[in-house]
Image: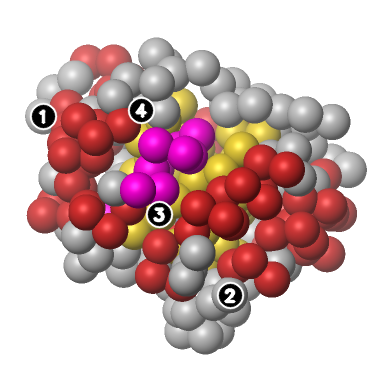
């Protein structure tokens, strides 16, 4: 089953399950789905590329049976090339990997496309924009990390977010530019003003008792555009 990223031109709020109740993941996803989202962000951590461990293909395969959302899979893992096939088979739709972890990023993008998925490249806060110059135009999405990857609930790093401006110039309007880390109703309008159109939010949604209201607040803040 093929799911493509929404065509550019819309702002998409993408809840990250990292701050959800992992014992009730399908229910948690159903709650945010009922608030009208198209994508859900799945954070994969290997305890090696980042100092934390989360989920892998078996959990994603089980979630696939419970959700029709686009699975936006963020691989915070070493040797992504070894694992992209497993994630595609598990039901990932978009597969994003880190430039810091990839020796041959263009080949990995080709492989992800051959597996029927869309591809994203991402870079850590301290990684320069130039590092993705060759691979970004081959991708369907660029993810700008606005915190150091590994944990939810960290503070937004504005210097990292400002890289969105240069990346938007680099890729033009036809590729989604996603941000991840510290996004809430205060920081969302800032990243939109920089040119981001795809906003991951973990703690700001699943850290609140009313997840639907929290999602609505981020969406409203983007629409009002106050920076
Ligand atoms: C961090 C993850 C994020 C995380 C964001 O390493 O990649 O997706 O869930 O969480 P918040 O929105 O809480 O900063
Ligand atoms: Zn993430």
Q: Which mark is residue 79?
A: 2
| CA gap, disc 4 and disc 1 | 15 Å
| CA gap, disc 3 and disc 4 | 15 Å
- Span shown in magenta: 134-146
Nearest the viewer among 46 and 154 is 46
Q: Nearer the viewer, mark 3 or mark 2?
A: 2
| CA gap, disc 3 and disc 2 | 14 Å
Crowding at dot 3, Cα within 10 Å, few <14 / some 14-19 / many 20+, comes out as: many
Q: Nearer the viewer, mark 4 or mark 1?
A: 4
Question: Is 25 on the left-hand or right-hand side of 123?
Answer: right
Nearest the viewer among 168 and 19 is 168
Mark 2 touches mark 1? (CB < 8 Å): no
In the displayed structure, 146 sits above or below 154; it is above
Q: Which residue is mark 1?
A: 227
Disc with the residue nearer the chain's start (4 vs 2): 2
* Quadrant in which residue 189 is drawn: top left
Crowding at dot 1, Cα within 10 Å, few <14 / some 14-19 / many 20+, comes out as: few
Give SS at disc 4. loop
Q: Which residue is mark 3?
A: 122
Question: Is 88 on the left-hand or right-hand side of 189?
Answer: right
Residue 136 visible in the shown view: yes
| CA gap, disc 1 and disc 3 | 25 Å
Q: Quadrant of the C terminus?
A: top left
Residue 94 visible in the shown view: no
Residue 221 is one of the magenta-drawn residues: no
Looking at the picture, how far across and down is residue 132, in whole percent?
32, 52
In the displayed structure, 133 sits above or below 215; it is below
Nearest the viewer among 175 and 213 is 175
Residue depicted at x 49% and y 59%:
105
Looking at the picture, how far across and down is residue 49, in whole percent?
48, 79
Q: Which mark is residue 197?
A: 4
């Amino acid at each position: 089953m093929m799911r493509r990223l929404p065509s550019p031109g819309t702002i998409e709020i993408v809840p990250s399950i990292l701050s959800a109740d992992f014992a009730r993941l399908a229910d948690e996803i159903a709650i945010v789905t009922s608030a009208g989202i198209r994508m859900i962000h799945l954070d994969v951590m290997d305890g090696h590329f980042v100092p934390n461990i989360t989920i892998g293909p078996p959990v994603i395969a089980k979630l696939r049976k419970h959700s029709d959302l686009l699975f936006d899979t963020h691989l915070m893992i070493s040797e992504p090339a070894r694992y992209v096939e497993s994630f595609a088979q598990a039901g990932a739709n978009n597969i994003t990997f880190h430039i810091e972890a990839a020796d041959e990023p263009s080949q990995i993008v080709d492989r992800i496309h051959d597996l029927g998925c869309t591809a994203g490249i991402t870079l850590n806060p301290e990684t320069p924009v130039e590092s993705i110059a060759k691979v970004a135009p081959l991708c369907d999405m660029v993810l700008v990390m606005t915190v150091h990857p590994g944990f939810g609930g960290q503070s937004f790093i504005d210097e990292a977010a400002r890289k969105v401006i240069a990346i938007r110039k680099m890729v033009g309007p036809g590729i989604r530019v996603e941000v991840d880390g510290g996004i809430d109703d205060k920081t969302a309008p800032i990243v939109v003003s920089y040119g981001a159109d795809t906003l991951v939010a973990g703690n700001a949604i699943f850290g609140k008792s009313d997840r639907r209201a929290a999602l609505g607040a981020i969406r409203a803040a983007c629409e009002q555009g106050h920076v």
